[in-house]
Image: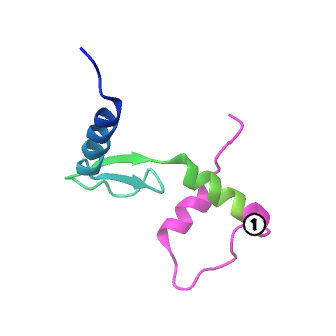
């Protein structure tokens, strides 16, 4: 049996498009009931790096943003 690789990759791509995968920025966010949900630690690592390059977390945010508060309260240990 001969395997047609382009057709296989196209099939896998179409399967993931139909999957409706949602990526959350923080693990405490509300999970949608009808979707596959993953948490990406990359967002937290990028947030920590942004804060490091900009001199730390913001002093205040008007109006308060709950996601920013969650991200600032969690420190990602990138080397670990």
Determine whether 22 is above or below 38 in the image. below
Q: Secondary structure at mark 1?
A: loop
Can residue 74 be seen in the rendering of this structure? Answer: no
Q: Residue at x 33, y 48 (%)?
A: 37
User: x, y percentage for residue 65?
Assistant: 50, 74
User: x, y percentage for residue 42?
Assistant: 57, 49
Magenta segment: does it hold 72? yes
Instruction: Answer with left or right where residue 3 lies relative to residue 76.
Output: left
* Furthest-bottom residue in this view: 62
Q: Nearer the viewer, residue 61 or 21?
A: 21
Residue located beneath label 1 in the image: 56
Q: Residue at x 29, y 22 (%)?
A: 3
User: x, y percentage for residue 47?
Assistant: 63, 60
User: x, y percentage for residue 23?
Assistant: 40, 53
Q: State which region is magenta.
A: 51-80
Instruction: Answer with left or right where residue 39 lies relative to residue 53.
Output: left
Instruction: Answer with left or right where residue 44 lies relative to residue 13.
Output: right
* Furthest-left residue in this view: 34
Quadrant where the C terminus sits is top right
Count of numbered circles on the image:
1
What is the chief secondary structure element of the magenta stretch?
A: loop
Q: Nearer the viewer, residue 20 or 56?
A: 20
């Amino acid at each position: 049996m001969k395997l047609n690789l382009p057709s296989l990759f196209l099939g896998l791509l179409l399967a993931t498009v139909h999957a409706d995968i949602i990526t959350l920025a923080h693990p405490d966010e509300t999970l949608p009931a009808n979707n596959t949900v993953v948490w990406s630690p990359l967002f937290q690592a990028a947030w920590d790096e942004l804060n490091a390059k900009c001199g730390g977390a913001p002093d205040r945010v008007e109006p308060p943003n709950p996601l920013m508060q969650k991200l600032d309260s969690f420190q990602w240990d990138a080397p670990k």
